[in-house]
Image (tube, rainbow, N blue to C red):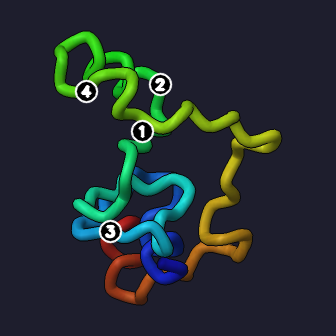
Amino acid sequence: YDLLERLAPGQRKLELFGRPHNVHKGWTTLGNQLGKTQISEPWLRQHLLDEGVFDEADMAPLPQPPQDPLVPPWGGHPPPELLPKAAKENE
């Protein structure tokens, strides 16, 4: 998970065949062993309820938003330097 977080900071991520022990904040995890549906994006949750895809009773409570919603890019480390070839193309 850490590697993928560094490769795509702040982006949506999807895990298929997830289990309760590997649900991560910021990830959409699908799996038949998860119990109630957990959707943390309010707009997606409401859309799926409006479309009748899920019933409110099938869904876990909406999580509280984080106190500091900003995720530092690159996991708080400086971004990698451009490779020499890429740097020449950008000039």
Query: Which secondary structure lies at badge 4?
Result: loop
- Tell me the crowding category of disc 1: few under 14, some 14 to 19, or many 20 or more residues within 10 angstroms, Cα based: many
Tell which tag, 4 or 1, sits nearer the viewer.
Answer: 4
Residue type, label 2: Pro
Circle 2 is placed at which residue position? 42
Q: Is residue 30 left or right of residue 51?
A: right
Circle 3 is placed at which residue position? 18
**Label located before the other in sequence (3 or 1):** 3
**Label located before the other in sequence (4 or 2):** 2
Circle 1 is placed at which residue position? 39
Residue type, label 1: Ile
The structure residue drawn at horizontal position 55% and vertical position 33%, both measured from the top left corner, is 61
> Which quadrant does the C terminus fall into?
bottom left
**Label located before the other in sequence (4 or 1):** 1
Circle 4 is placed at which residue position? 54
In the displayed structure, 31 sits above or below 3; it is: above
The structure residue drawn at horizontal position 18% and vertical position 25%, both measured from the top left corner, is 53
Spatial separation of the CA atoms under disc 3 and disc 1: 14 Å
User: Between 23 and 26, which is closer to the camera in this rendering?
Assistant: 23
Spatial separation of the CA atoms under disc 3 and disc 4: 19 Å
In the displayed orientation, state which residue is furthest to the bottom: 84
Query: Which secondary structure lies at badge 2?
Result: helix
Residue type, label 3: Gly
Q: Is residue 49 left or right of residue 62?
A: left
The structure residue drawn at horizontal position 47% and vertical position 24%, both measured from the top left corner, is 42
Residue type, label 4: Phe
- Tell me the crowding category of disc 4: few under 14, some 14 to 19, or many 20 or more residues within 10 angstroms, Cα based: some
User: Between 87 and 7, which is closer to the camera in this rendering?
Assistant: 7
**Label located before the other in sequence (3 or 4):** 3
In the displayed structure, 80 sits above or below 34; it is: below
